Image: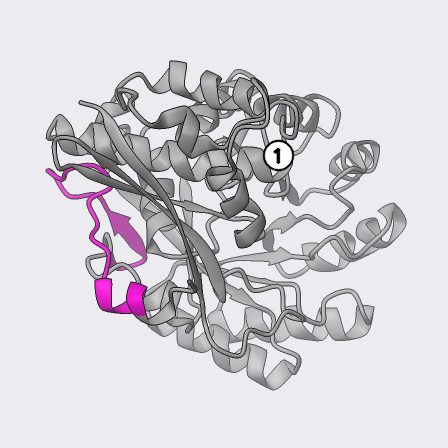
């Protein structure tokens, strides 16, 4: 089997609001075709047009080459060698950032092909399934008002979610308002549903310690990215000062960054985004670094059903995965791009007993409608 084409497809909803931290308004879909008629799909979480250029750029010299040019004619089953070829071929402008983001989407698409060609799911192809039922948490931006926060929390609970996360939005502007938001959400969902807060990098160390102490009263399961992503010393000190689990890592690309996060930041729950960190191939190495340190993995997946499916197979295939992010965004890209999403029922995503690759299909009409030429 040979790769015949690599396509980076930019999708964007009309009237995109760049002031919101909402990655479901646009995305970069990767499609890889082969000479045996098997097509794989992946997704990139980055600035879409920047990552698109990484895929499509013509070669400048031996270590400054676009991903498409590196992959045409290659065997998609040689996944480790191709990952290294892409990494070394982009090292002059890569090593992290958009180059590794683009590699991530390509890597997911390659695993989709491997699964389809071998009549196996991606999780089986990656080494086996530890679990077929994975708790999915409703992931939502925090609304501005306390009233709306309570209403949304109640709505998600009625949909069957057993865990809910709110993040960004007004968090960090007022300690009093932050507490009112969390208090109202907890009252709306009761004590049996896990509640997580994504602070969105808003505090310094002392501010984070103060708010962690406040949130402890409301049984918050984890506090996500309260500090700047580079403040590893701050994360270590925060972890030492609070009973809350501290989560983070969606900003990072490559296993060396996660090694620093684990060893210097002492973060409890690692959140690699498969569409940014290096794809499934690199994420599995990250997962086992965390496993060796007795840390758990919950991948960041605030995009379309393509990334949700890849993340679900990833969590299923590692010993320390236990939960999956499930965006409740109303964006048509999040809701409709994948026309056969993995089954969500009673608060869990269920892997089918048999599926090929990621086990999803792309809605061509949605793709055509939101594609930007």
Q: Residue 133: image x %, image y %? A: 26, 43
Q: Residue 165, can we see it?
A: yes
Q: Say left or right for 151 vs 1.
A: right
Q: Residue 108: image x %, image y %? A: 36, 36
Please say whether residue 174 is one of the residues in the magenta stretch.
no
- Determine the secondary structure under disc 1: loop
Q: Which residue is mark 1?
A: 268
Q: Residue at x 77, y 37 (%)?
A: 235
Q: Residue at x 58, y 20 (%)?
A: 63
Point out the image quarter for the N terminus. Answer: top left
Point out the image quarter for the C terminus. Answer: bottom left
Q: Tell me which secondary structure the magenta stretch mostly adopts.
A: loop
Where are the magenta residues, as a range? 344-368
The front one of 278 and 232 is 278
Q: Is residue 24 above or below residue 93?
A: below
The front one of 69 and 208 is 69
Q: Is residue 20 above or below residue 98?
A: below
Q: Residue 254: image x %, image y %? A: 58, 27
Q: Residue 131, can we see it?
A: no
């Amino acid at each position: 089997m040979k790769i015949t084409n690599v396509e980076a497809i930019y999708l964007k909803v009309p009237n995109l609001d760049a002031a919101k931290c909402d990655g479901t308004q646009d995305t970069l879909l990767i499609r890889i075709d082969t000479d045996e008629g098997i097509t794989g799909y992946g997704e990139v979480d980055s600035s879409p047009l920047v990552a698109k250029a990484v895929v499509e750029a013509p070669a400048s010299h031996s270590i400054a080459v676009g991903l498409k040019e590196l992959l045409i004619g290659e065997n998609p089953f040689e996944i480790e060698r191709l990952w290294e070829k892409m990494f070394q071929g982009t090292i002059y402008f890569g090593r992290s950032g958009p180059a590794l983001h683009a590699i991530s989407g390509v890597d997911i698409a390659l695993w989709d092909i491997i699964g389809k060609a071998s009549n196996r799911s991606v999780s089986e192809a990656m080494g086996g399934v530890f679990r077929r039922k994975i708790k999915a948490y409703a992931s939502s931006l925090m609304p501005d008002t306390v009233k709306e926060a309570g209403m949304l929390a109640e709505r998600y609970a009625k949909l069957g979610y057993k865990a809910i996360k709110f993040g960004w939005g007004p968090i960090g502007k007022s300690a009093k308002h932050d507490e009112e938001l969390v208090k109202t959400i907890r009252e709306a969902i009761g004590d049996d549903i896990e509640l997580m807060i994504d602070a969105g990098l808003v505090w310094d160390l002392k501010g984070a310690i103060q708010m962690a102490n406040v949130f402890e009263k409301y049984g918050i399961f984890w506090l996500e990215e309260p500090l700047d992503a580079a403040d590893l010393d701050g994360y270590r000190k925060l972890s030492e000062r609070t009973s809350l689990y501290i989560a983070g890592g969606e900003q990072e690309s490559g296993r060396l960054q996660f090694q620093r996060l684990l060893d210097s930041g002492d973060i409890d729950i690692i959140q690699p985004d498969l569409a940014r960190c290096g794809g499934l191939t690199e994420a599995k190495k990250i997962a086992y670094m965390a496993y060796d340190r007795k840390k758990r993995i919950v991948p960041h997946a605030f995009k379309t059903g393509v990334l949700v499916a890849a993340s679900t197979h990833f969590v299923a295939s590692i010993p320390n995965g236990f939960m999956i992010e499930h965006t409740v965004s109303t964006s048509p890209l999040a809701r409709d791009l994948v026309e056969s999403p993995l089954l969500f029922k009673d608060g869990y995503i269920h892997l089918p007993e048999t599926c090929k690759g990621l086990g999803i299909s792309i809605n061509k009409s949605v793709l055509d409608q939101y594609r930007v030429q």
